[in-house]
């Protein structure tokens, strides 16, 4: 009977592997299916939870978990993105490894991953699979088992090894499709360089693209939350308003003004401003993916104003020193402060102000600053 049971298990195991591979390729064309694909991998390797993360240029391009609480999945995402352990970096690409063979149990219990994610999840033994790794792109799949369960065996490693190349191929195709769609007419490069948070949402209000500035706004964990499932907020009332704003935008026919809401931050910080814009079918030809239904623009009112001195000089015919002085005024400095920073006398600074107002056809300093902020603000990263 034992050989028969073993044979049945082997057949079931192969079916689970084939099912996982099928789900992986389906997710290429249906990004919302990555969660189901991750769950199928978890089943195929006999794990209790799984986590898939892909980063591109330091930005999370895909983050999916199965069987793991959302707060713990976020913690695991931070660990892989911000402080990946050396023992994981040393694992060859395409080769699944047991955590127990790469680091001792005693050392593992001292790691951030163990104390911030594994222990709170009541897990212990883990498996890590580096799917792909380069200077600009890293993809990892990790899995774990409940505390008290046995370690991953050779059959589990074999299943992960069979799945690895298919996962790499599917994610590579997914990356190319996203890049191709967004790069049309330079959309991808523009969105990546904006000093404004940009999040593209599908019909289920799930993010399909998050630019670096929006990612940075989430880093302090002070108000805004962005993950593979949703855009939300720590304050419940803000989360509801944000959800209602997004829902209204996705449902609209584009015949109303873009709604806005606010995401509170810890006092004395000012709240973030979130504006939602519907993406209509005719917009899709301009580089936005066809499954994008809404765009969120996220503004930080505390962001230091950056005025492009070269643009200001060319636009209004200012000298380099006048442009430098004007930029200091636009950043909130008064005339005396600007003079001190430039190493000139206050009288000279006031002459600058008079000449600049003449060239810009403004009559008060407040008018000048308003004009500079409208026409000279640098909204792109270098």
Image (cartoon, grey):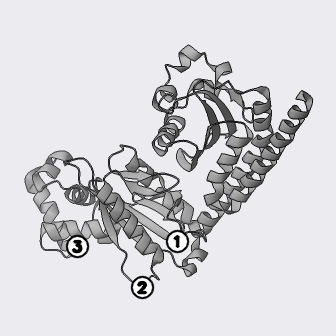
At 35% from the left and 73% from the top, the residue drawn is: 259
The residue pinned by badge 2 equals 255
Label 1 element class:
loop
Q: Which structural element holds mark 3?
A: helix
Q: Is residue 315 above or below residue 114?
A: below
Mark 3 neighbour density, 10 Å: few (under 14) some (14–19) many (20 or more) = some
Q: Secondary structure at mark 2?
A: loop
Q: Residue furthest bottom?
A: 255
Q: Residue furthest front?
A: 1
Q: Residue 280: where, in percent of width, then height? A: 52, 79
Give the residue drawn at x 68%, y 41%. 42
Distance between the alpha carbons at the discs numbered 3 and 2: 37 Å
Tell me the quarter of the picture where residue 41 sits: top right
Residue 237 tag number: none
Q: Name the residue beneath numbered marker 1.
A: 293
The residue nearer to you, when weighing 150 against 194, is 150
Q: Answer whether residue 98 is visible to the viewer in this image.
A: yes
- Marks 1 and 3 in Cβ contact (< 8 Å): no
Residue corresponding to mark 3: 360
Mark in front: 3 vs 2: 2
Query: In the rendered structure, which disc, 1 or 2, sits on the residue that comes first in sequence?
Result: 2
Q: Where's residue 7, x and y in %?
A: 89, 35
**Residue occupying the point 74% across, 41% down:** 44
Which quadrant would residue 354 be assigned to in this image? bottom left
Q: Quadrant of the N terminus?
A: top right
Q: 196 and 362: which one is in front?
A: 196
The answer to whether residue 26 is left or right of residue 355 is: right
Quick check: 43 left or right of 62? right
């Amino acid at each position: 009977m034992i050989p028969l049971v073993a044979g049945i298990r082997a057949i079931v195991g192969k079916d689970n592997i084939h099912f996982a591979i099928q789900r992986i390729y389906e997710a290429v064309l249906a990004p919302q299916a990555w969660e189901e694909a991750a769950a199928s991998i978890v089943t195929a390797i006999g794990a209790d939870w799984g986590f898939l993360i892909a980063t591109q240029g330091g930005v999370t391009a895909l983050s999916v978990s199965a069987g793991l609480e959302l707060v713990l999945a976020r913690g695991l995402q931070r660990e892989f993105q911000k402080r990946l352990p050396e023992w994981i970096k040393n694992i060859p690409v395409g080769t699944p490894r047991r955590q127990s063979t790469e680091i001792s149990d005693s050392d593992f219990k001292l790691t951030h991953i163990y104390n911030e994610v594994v222990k709170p999840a009541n897990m212990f033994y883990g498996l890590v699979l580096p799917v792909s790794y380069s200077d600009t792109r890293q993809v990892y799949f990790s899995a774990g088992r409940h505390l008290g369960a046995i370690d991953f065996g050779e059959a589990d490693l074999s299943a992960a090894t069979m799945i690895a190349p298919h996962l790499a191929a599917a994610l590579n195709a997914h990356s190319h499709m996203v890049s191709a769609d967004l790069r049309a007419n330079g959309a991808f490069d523009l969105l990546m360089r904006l000093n404004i948070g940009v999040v593209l949402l599908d019909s289920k209000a799930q993010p399909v693209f998050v630019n670096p500035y929006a990612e940075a706004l989430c880093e302090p964990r002070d108000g805004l939350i962005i993950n593979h499932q949703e855009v939300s907020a720590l304050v419940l009332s803000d989360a509801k308003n944000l959800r209602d704003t997004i829902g209204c935008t996705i449902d609209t026919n584009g015949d109303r003004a873009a709604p806005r809401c606010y995401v509170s931050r810890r006092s004395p910080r000012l709240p973030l401003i979130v504006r939602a814009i519907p993406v209509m079918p005719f917009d899709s030809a301009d580089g936005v993916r066809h499954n994008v239904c809404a765009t969120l623009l996220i503004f930080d009112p505390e962001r230091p104003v950056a005025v492009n001195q070269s643009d200001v000089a060319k636009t209004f015919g200012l000298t380099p020193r006048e442009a430098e002085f004007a930029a200091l005024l636009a950043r909130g400095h008064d005339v005396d402060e600007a003079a001190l920073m430039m190493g000139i006398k206050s009288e000279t600074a006031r002459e600058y102000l008079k000449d600049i107002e003449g060239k810009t056809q403004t009559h008060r300093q407040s008018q000048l600053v308003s004009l500079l902020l409208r026409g000279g603000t640098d909204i792109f990263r270098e």
